[in-house]
Amino acid sequence: MLVTQRQFESTVNAASARVTDPRAGFQGPSSMSWRIGREAVVFVGGGRAALLQLAHPYVAHGVDQHSETRTDPIGRFNRTFLHVYNMIFGSHGDALQSAHRVRAIHDTIHGPITENVGRFEAGHRYRAHDHDALMWVHATLIHGAVQAYDLIVQPLSWAERNQYYQESKSFAALFGIDAALMPATWTEFDAYVNDMVESDTIRVGAAASELAKYLLTPPNRVSEPFFDWYLLMTAGLLPDSVRAQFGLRFGAEHERIFRASIGTLHHVVKVLPPRLRYVPAYIEAKRRLAGKEGPDLVGRAIEQTVLRALAPAGQKVLGKAVGPHAQAAARCPVAG
């Protein structure tokens, strides 16, 4: 089922009608969405979300045929999270602007699946406006954020997970996803994700494998330690069946390092100052609600410094050329 323009406008308007403070946007400072989404450490689960998304042939072929992931990873990183964070932390107007921008981008993303993979045969046509594929991408982000937060920051109760999931329906609405077609509770949502993972829809084909290899392969020796660690963490967070389809190893020694890393990150998060612990979009949202418009200069400077340090040689970050030691955060996908 495709999300038509009329359906998109209907879901967006319905979500907008529930906004009580336009300055706070669709969620607000008391929401679980802000509490979880503000944590920079949730990016540890970005590789898991991206590989689960690529395991859906619609996503893999859409990214392979239309995305600038290979040619402009820094730019794609910045553009993706501009829109995602506008929808989560932005004002009502900013969130709507990003929703319509993403919709316009998705208008251009369609084409053929070029291989037999899972239940799809070569020649099958995909569209980015497919409702089920959009719901799967949304699910990987929400499910993965809960997993990372629960493991690294602090365990979440069922009520907190359910609240976060219910709030995410407003986020989903900004992509035209119909809440009436989504699982009703966290328990049903969790079952949906597990069922999808084991279904013949989620299958890793050649396009997904090639993209995953590109995204998780270090470009030089300087970045190898980070990539080795991030790949191990991604493997540890993935469901067993999807990990196996991508050919990722995760033996007893890998699991030991994974558990030790989770423990270390948990302790580090507790002592980090807010400017390092929280994403700049959250700091900016708090400033906006306090009547202090403008960017979080410190947070943005740190963010772009990290991107410059880990970007491909010759890439630009906000107009500045990057040096030769490159390519991690921009290539470690988070939003697929």
Image: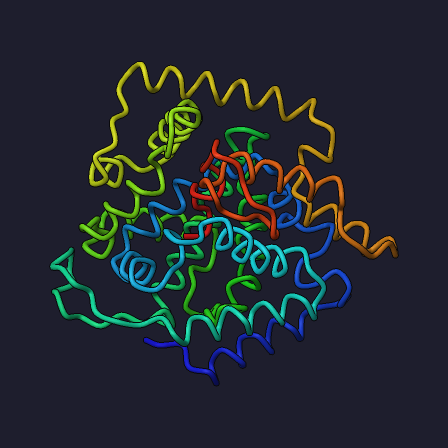
The picture places residue 132, in percent across and down from the top left corner, at 34, 65
The residue at 67%/37% (across/down) is 302
Q: Quadrant of the N terminus?
A: bottom left
Q: Is residue 272 left or right of residue 240?
A: right
Q: Relative to 253, say whether 116 is above or below.
A: below
Task: Determine the image quadrant of residue 246.
Answer: top left
Task: Determine the image quadrant of residue 35.
Answer: top right
Query: Considering depth in this image, is 199 or 276 the residue closer to the camera?
Result: 276
Q: Is residue 147 left or right of residue 292?
A: left
Query: Considering depth in this image, is 94 or 74 the residue closer to the camera?
Result: 74
Q: Is residue 237 left or right of residue 56?
A: right
Toward the right, the furthest residue is 291
The residue at 54%/81% (across/down) is 9
The residue at 23%/45% (across/down) is 209
Total marks placed: 0
The picture places residue 45, in percent across and down from the top left corner, at 46, 38
The residue at 67%/33% (across/down) is 277
Instruction: Tell me the colour scheme of the image.
Output: rainbow
Q: Relative to 221, say whether 118 is above or below.
A: below
The picture places residue 185, in percent across and down from the top left corner, at 48, 54
The picture places residue 271, in percent across and down from the top left corner, at 70, 22
Query: Considering depth in this image, is 72 or 246 the residue closer to the camera?
Result: 72
